[in-house]
Image (cartoon, helix red, strand yellow):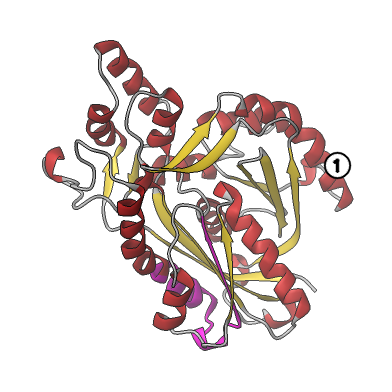
Amino acid sequence: MSTVIAGIGTALPPHRISQEDAALIARKYACESPSQERLFAALYRRAGVEGRGCVVLDRSDGPLEGRQTFYGEAAPSTLERMRRYEAEAGPLGLLAAKAALDAAGIPPGRVTHLITVSCSGFHAPGLDVTLIGHLPLRAEAARTHVGFMGCHGALNGLRVADAFLRADPDACVLLCALELCSLHHQYGWDAERIVSNSLFADGAAAVVAVPEAASAGVARASRRLRLVASGSTLIADSEDAMSWRIGDHGFQMTLSNRVPDLIGTHLRPWLESWLARHGLDLASVGSWAVHPGGPRILSAVAEALGLGHDALGVSQRVLAEHGNMSSPTILFILDRLARAGAPGPCVALAFGPGLAVEAAILD
């Protein structure tokens, strides 16, 4: 019995900013010399991002000085950032969850299991309780949180959903991945953190998953995705390549320039072996949903796997239009591929602290 994604919903903050304007605002918190300003501008240009949604924005237009008031001369404390997370997470997550249920044509009362995914904030009662109370879901809905797993968290969530559905043929799972990465903007001159500042953004995405036997007549066939398999591997001696730690002034991301090389060296051998266990090879993959950790990561994946110029086009466009939203991003990509009727099987890939690789085969 396979798991079917019957509906996907996405949601963005009400306000967005262009990359050019974001750089103009952010540089005053990082640069102390003209040479630093030149490198700073280059890092923002190379990020592959054209614009993104951010919950810290008070408006989308007008003078730059009036666009946001959350960041000032002093960096907000982690407490202040978590209070903003608590205020913003519920409304955004609700939008995504409602869109997914609508896409699936499934009433909220049918949901038996709720999975939430986030690595950018904590509070309790949390997003799960908000969703139960405001969708509303049944009070008996079983809640599971996938926390602090980074950009691949939604794929971990899909694996959990698959386990629930295989255990109970009457189950219906709602998964909601939400990240508010703009709450963790870091001050000061540090090239790795500036790269993170230039990439990360806010967003939410949700999926409704049901057993394949219960999926007939649910959503449109062209938009259904069947989860065939999921896989995971840790790359040896790579713990320093990517990290996500809680500091006094937000969560601090470390994204080493080693990551593309590690992907280039280790991804293909593992992926070929894993695909072979499921009767596939690289040539038989019809489409790719690769999490856009950044342009260099996408390039490293394409080069390692020998993919053509357009194979990762959807990933590149999502990055350009919305930035790296961490865990929801892969669901934005899958939604676009499903709507476009992209050929299957589709392989989804995402990377996170470890350095970890998460994968899924969907058809």
| Magenta stretch, residue numbers | 94-118
- Looking at the rendering, in which quadrant would you find the N terminus? bottom right
- Looking at the rendering, in which quadrant would you find the C terminus? bottom right
User: Within the image, what quadrant is residue 306 found in?
Assistant: top right
Secondary structure of the residue carrying numbered label 1: helix
Task: Where is residue 202? Give x, y as percent.
Answer: 39, 51
Task: Where is residue 50? Give x, y as percent.
Answer: 35, 37
Q: Label 1: how many residues lie within 10 Å, few (<14), some (14-19) or many (20+)?
A: few
Q: Looking at the picture, tell me which residue is in the foreground, 237 or 159.
A: 237
Asked if the stretch drawn in magenta spans residue 112, the answer is: yes
The single residue placed furthest to the front in the displayed view is 248
Q: In the figure, is residue 320 to the left or right of 261?
A: left
Q: Looking at the picture, tell me which residue is in the foreground, 306 or 43.
A: 43
Instruction: Answer above or below: position of 61 versus 157.
Output: above
Instruction: Answer above or below: position of 19 versus 332.
Output: above
Who's the residue at 64% across and 32% down the image?
A: 302
Q: Is residue 47 visible?
A: no
Task: Where is residue 249? Give x, y as percent.
Answer: 36, 42
Q: Is residue 222 visible?
A: yes
Task: Where is residue 34? Give x, y as percent.
Answer: 25, 12
Instruction: Answer above or below: position of 179 versus 97.
Output: above
**Amino acid type, mark 1:** Ser
Who's the residue at 67% across and 79% down the image?
A: 215
Instruction: Answer above or below: position of 32 versus 250.
Output: above
Residue labelled with disc 1:
273
